[in-house]
Image: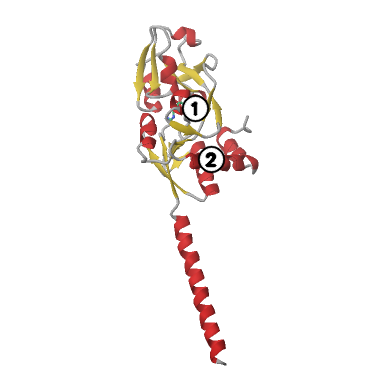
Amino acid sequence: MSKKVLALIVLTAFALALGLAGCGSQQTAEQAKVLKVGMDAAFAPFEFQDDKSKDYTGFDVDLINAIGKQMGYEVKIQNTGFDGLIPALEAGNIDVIISAMTITEERAKKVNFSKPYYKSGLSIVVKSDNNTIKGFKDLEGKQIAVQIGSTGAVEAKKIKDAKIREFNTVPEAFLELKAGGVDAVVNDLPVNDYYIAKSGAKDAKLVGDLLTAEDYGIATTKKNAELAQKIDKALEELKTNGEYAKIFEKWFGKKPQ
Ligand code: ARG
């Protein structure tokens, strides 16, 4: 073998090794892409902790995991009180909020919202033996439990002479209803439905029509418009490839509206 050929082989091997090393470091940089996701994980079936494993589960959890995967990010969930989510996003402690959060004008002043990903609205839950409250009109002057910082709290406060009791989490509001401390809970319909179906069928019932039409959105900081765009793109792709519909059916037993 001539010296020239040998030198060429050595050089090629060297270049290859360099190239591979390059790929390697690129891969670790990719793997390090983490999406810090905030949610109030006490809002079944959207976000809650599995009784046994304590893992976070629900429609929002599956959806954000699928979005993260689509974007090439690893999703890390941080359980945060609902009224602390937007402050946490503004402080940079989390990158994203997915928490059955309604897109409102007020909130949109502080955060960017993705395209709507779920259609919801508010409804009323009362004890099953309550025959006087049949709709929102009947809530005047009544004691109403809501979650702090929720759209339910905002709407309930508009009801004449009602006494509003604010709880950190929705399960606490339901407990208070069960204990007879309040006359009604005003909260998102799909969560009320799930509560009644899963645990409270004997104790509680749904009354009246939907009070509001609300859309849930995924929130990101105003400082990172690119992230909001990436999330919208991923959401769109999941809608096109059928993954969104699959997750929807898993949690709601029907096809998306
Ligand atoms: N959709 C309502 C809102 O945005 C309630 C959301 C509460 N979410 C939760 N994970 N606790 O105000």
Quarter of the picture containing the N terminus is bottom right
**Quadrant of res 163:** top left
Q: Residue at x 39, y 24 (%)?
A: 149
Q: Is residue 240 above or below residue 26?
A: above
Q: Is residue 194 above or below residue 231?
A: above
Q: Residues within 10 Å of mark 1 (few under 14, many from 20)?
A: many
Q: Residue at x 40, y 14 (%)?
A: 157
* Type of amino acid at the residue the image marks with label 1: Ile
Q: Residue at x 42, y 7 (%)?
A: 140
Describe the element under mark 1 as helix, strand or loop. Answer: loop
Q: What is the CA distance from the residue labelled 2 to the residue labelled 1?
A: 16 Å
Q: In the rendering, at what x and y percent does residue 120 appear?
A: 54, 25
**Quadrant of res 237:** top right
Q: Which residue is drawn at 37% across and 40% down?
A: 92
Describe the element under mark 2 as helix, strand or loop. Answer: helix
Camera-nearest residue between 217 and 159: 217
- Ligand 1: quadrant of the figure: top left
Q: In the rendering, at what x and y percent does residue 26 appear?
A: 48, 61
Residue lying at the far front of the rendered structure: 4
Camera-nearest residue between 163 and 1: 1
Which residue is label 1 attached to?
A: 103
Q: Nearer the viewer, mark 2 or mark 1?
A: 2
Which residue is label 2 attached to?
A: 229
Camera-nearest residue between 128 and 121: 121
* Type of amino acid at the residue the image marks with label 2: Gln
